[in-house]
Amino acid sequence: MPPLQEFLALAGAIAPEHRYRTVYDTDFSVLVPGKEPIDADTLASFARIGFAGRTVVDLGCNFGFFTFQASRLGAASVLGVDRESRVLEGCELLKRHFNIAGVTFERHDLDDGQSPLLSRRFDIAMLVEFIGKTFVVENRVAPALAFLERLSQRELVVSVQKIYWIRKELRTTPQRLKALYPARYVSGGDFLLLEYVRDFFAPRWRMEALSPMGEGYEKPRKFLRFTPA
């Protein structure tokens, strides 16, 4: 069976919560619809990262869209990381379908502070299209960022939604979030996630917005690059 057909069969058998990103073919036609499509602005923001000749790790890669895209943009090697073994099987099938060299996949858990991955270093460490509502409500943002920071001393790439509406999107209350986060990140009915991420890395890292940035609430997620201050 061709690898693409194997992938489609496997993806159809995986629970929806583990295939949340839309999966695209080489011509960007949709192979498997998901909750999070990739638009032209996202591609343009991602293309601003200087991948040429660099080693990259992509945490929470799901079916590897950004892993493969980093390779297409010239990365010397890219490691995609996910904790779901069936998802990684799908990544390997897509790798065969795309015929892309220099890409590997490994199973690691970002919640594991003793992960062997943490002994390795990369030119660029990415955590993109990963931190979302569940991470905010469960207070898992800081541990994920700390895991990311241990993997590179040169460049970190993160994408997050700037602001979440606390009641409508997070399904919680300002009071509950103030028990988890400093009060300055809870502004009325908004949770200021991008500011929280920026301040987590300051003053060690300098933030640069790779995505266009307006005032107030915006979707989709914004791409941010952090370099040593």
Image (cartoon, rainbow, N blue to C red):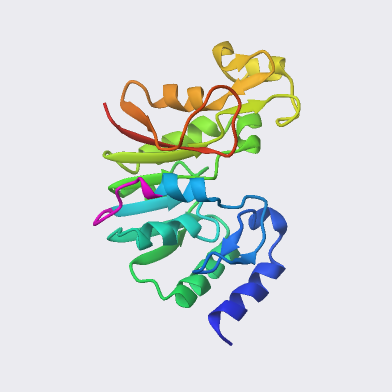
Badge count: 0
Residue at (58% x, 39% y) in the render: 220
Front-most of residues 76 and 18: 76
Q: In the image, is 169 to the left or to the right of 206?
A: right
Front-most of residues 91 and 74: 74
From where the camera sits, is residue 116 visible? no
- Res 171 quadrant in image: top right
Q: Residue furthest bottom?
A: 1
Residue 103, placed above or below residue 109: below
Query: Is residue 51 located in the magenta-colored stretch of the structure?
Result: yes
Q: Which residue lies furthest to the left in this view?
A: 53
Q: Is the magenta stretch mostly helix, strand or loop?
A: loop
Query: Is residue 215 located in the magenta-colored stretch of the structure?
Result: no
- Res 24 quadrant in image: bottom right
Give the quarter of the figure containing the N terminus.
bottom right
Residue 130, placed above or below residue 186: below
From where the camera sits, is residue 7 visible? yes
Front-most of residues 150 and 113: 150
Give the quarter of the figure containing the C terminus.
top left
Where residue 23 sits in the image (x, y, percent)?
58, 62
Residue at (58% x, 66% y) in the render: 29
Where residue 107 sits in the image (x, y, percent)?
49, 58
- Res 33 quadrant in image: bottom right
Where residue 97 sits in the image (x, y, percent)?
49, 76
Where residue 121 sits in the image (x, y, percent)?
29, 48
Residue at (40% x, 41% y) in the render: 157
Region in magenta: 47-54
